[in-house]
Amino acid sequence: MKKYWNTEYYTQISVEELQQKALESTKSASNKGKTLSPIVVKSKSIIDSWWGQAWCDNLEHYADYESRIERGKRYVRSGAVIDLKITGSKILARVQGQRRSPYKVEIHISSLNEEHCQMIASKCSKNIKNLEALINGDFPDELKELFTGENGIFPTPREISFRCSCPDWAVMCKHVAAVLYGVGVRFDENPFMFFTLRGIDVTRMVDVALENKVEMMLENVQKPSKRILNHHEVENTFGIK
């Protein structure tokens, strides 16, 4: 007697089989003249850079995505994300699954509005010294909290929309989760992609931050510094009359 739920259909594909299917799909695409941009995980932690780590930590923070996160990690580590391209706020990817043909994944990330970017730039004025420091994540912890905390620049679930061609009924399937981790790998390769995804002109943001800092310095130029000793203090300190 057949069961209504065919549990065998939902058995998890082995890593070896997944990798073999991914290899076959890659060869098939190459034979058709298609250029793929696969995700290659080189680290045990999947990602290494501050921006990549912060991106993945942000995803794991939301309970909405909890059910498929671990499966997504397994898929991206196995090389199942055979193609991932970031264009503006859109992510287009192909992920190998149990079926012969890879699944198509499309993800949209909402861009930050001008007001939000201005607020971030203003708060960065005292902490960002140059573009290189920003890209390397080499800045004070309080600035990292500004970026990753509430009203930061990392997307919330409501700012992420996605769809996958697989039959999984979950809010987020493992293929989408694998792609989102793959995006973190892309940030390891090129942190500028994060700003592209969020619609931020990173050079402009740093320029505004530095301009704000200069303005603050000019506002205080006529104010005497507390570190300058007056005539009487000089006499008392050095015995000069």
Image: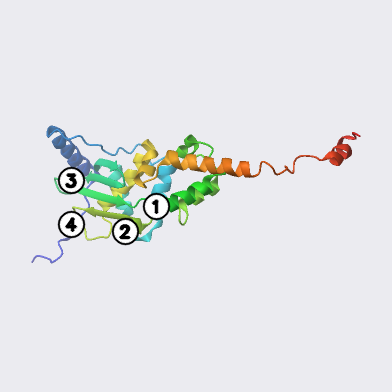
Badges 4 and 1: C-beta atoms under 8 Å apart? no
The residue beneath circle 4 is 167
Q: Residues within 10 Å of mark 1 (few under 14, many from 20)?
A: few
At numbered mark 3, what does the secondary structure look like: helix, strand or loop? loop
What is the CA distance from the residue labelled 2 to the residue labelled 3?
A: 22 Å
Marker disc for residue 102: 3
Residue depicted at 26% across the width and 54% down the height: 162
Mark 1 to mark 3 CA distance (whole Å): 35 Å
Camera-side mark, 1 or 2:
1
Q: Which residue is mark 2?
A: 67
The residue carrying mark 1 is: 113
**Placement of the C terminus among the 4 image quadrants:** top right
Q: Quadrant of the N terminus?
A: bottom left
Residue density around tag 2, few if under 14, some if 14–19, many if 20 or more, within 10 Å: some
Residue 24 in sight here:
yes
Residue type for callout 2: Ser
Q: Earlier in the sequence, mark 4 or mark 3?
A: 3
Instruction: Judge the density around disc 4: few (<14), some (14-19), many (≥20) Cα neighbours within 10 Å.
Output: few
Q: Secondary structure at mark 2?
A: helix
Q: Please, what secondary structure does the residue beneath circle 1 have?
A: loop
Q: Along the polypeptide, which appears first: circle 1 or circle 2?
A: 2
Mark 2 against mark 3, which lies toward the viewer? 3
Q: Residues within 10 Å of mark 3 (few under 14, many from 20)?
A: many
Is residue 43 in view from this perspective? no
Rounded to the nearest whole Å, what is the CA distance between mark 4 and mark 1? Answer: 34 Å
Q: Position of residue 128 (x, y in %)?
A: 53, 41
